[in-house]
Amino acid sequence: YEISACLVGSEMCIRDSDTSEITDTDMYIHPVPHLTALRALEVVGEIDHILLPVLAQHCRSLERIILGRRSTATVEQMAELIHSSSESLTVLELNYPSNIHGDTLVTALAPYCSQLDELSINVCRHAQSGFTDTSLLALSQHCMCLKSLNICTCTQVTEAAVVQLLQCCTQLQKLLIPLNCLSVDTVLGIAVSCWHYYSTAYYSVLVRIKLP
C-alpha cells in the first residue's frame, strides 16, 4: 500500500501496490495515529479490514471520504469509520464492493450522515444486489441536508422513492438519477422541492438523467 507518499497537507490517498505483497501490517498502520488532523481520505484500492478500524479510531474529523470498490472490511467497520466523523463529514463517495448488499451498506451508514452535502453512489453491475428503494428511503430519513446526490448507476430505485426523497431533502441543488425514474411526477416533485426551498432566492437546480 502506498500511504506516506500520498500524504498532501490534510489529505490521504491509499492505493494498492501491484509490485509487492503486504507482509507487515504495521508498515501502513504506523503513520495513522499521527493523522488526527486528517480531513480527506480516498481509498483507491481495496478497503482493508485491518486499516479501516485504525482510521476510525484516530481520524475523527474527516470532511471528505471516497471508498473504493474492493473490500475485505465489513459493513460494520465501514459504518464505524463514517460514525467517527459524523459531525464533520460533508462529502461521501461510495463505490460498492461487489460482495456487499447495497441496501445493507447504506442503511448502516445513513444514520451517521446527517451533515452530508454531497453523496455519490456507484453500484457495480455485478453486485449481488444493488442500491434499491430501501436505501433511498434511509437517505430520505437521515440525510435531509443533501445538496448534491448522484445515483445514476442505481437503476433498481423507483420513481416513487425519488419523489419521497425530494419531499424530504428540500435543499437539493443537483440530482443525478437513472432514466427509469423520470416521469411527470418526478418533475413535479423537483419543482415543488425547488419552490419550497428557493422561493426567496435565485438558484438553479441541475437534474441529469442517465441514458441507456
Image (cartoon, rainbow, N blue to C red):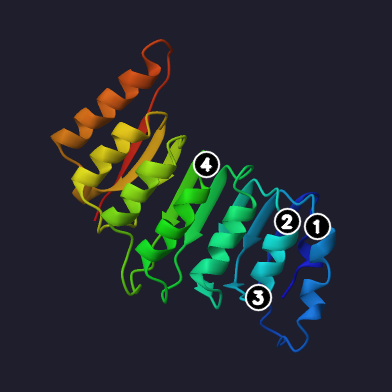
Q: Are marks 2 and 1 in contact (CB under 8 Å)?
A: yes
Distance from Cα at disc 2 to Cα at disc 4: 17 Å
Q: Are marks 2 and 4 in contact (CB under 8 Å)?
A: no
The three-letter code of the residue at mark 3 reads Asp
Helix, strand or loop under label 1: loop
Mark 2 or mark 4: name the one nearer the start of the chain.
2
Q: Nearer the viewer, mark 4 or mark 3?
A: 4
Residue labelled with disc 2: 59
Q: Is residue 7 among the parts visible in the rendering?
A: yes
Mark 4 or mark 3: name the one nearer the start of the chain.
3
Q: Position of residue 23 (x, y in %)?
A: 75, 89
Residue labelled with disc 4: 116
Residue labelled with disc 3: 16
- In the picture, which quadrant includes the C terminus? bottom left
Query: With 80 as the anchor, is 209 left or right in this view?
Result: left
Q: Position of residue 89 (x, y in %)?
A: 60, 45
Mark 3 or mark 2: name the one nearer the start of the chain.
3
Residue labelled with disc 1: 35
- Give the residue drawn at x 70%, y 88%: 21
The three-letter code of the residue at mark 2 reads Cys
Query: With 30 as the anchor, is 177 left or right in this view?
Result: left
Quadrant assignment, res 44: bottom right
Helix, strand or loop under label 3: loop
Most distant residue in the left direction: 184
Distance from Cα at disc 3 to Cα at disc 2: 20 Å
Distance from Cα at disc 2 to Cα at disc 1: 6 Å
Q: Nearer the viewer, mark 3 or mark 2?
A: 2
Q: Position of residue 83 (x, y in %)?
A: 58, 54
Quadrant assignment, res 124: bottom left
- Give the residue drawn at x 43%, y 63%: 105
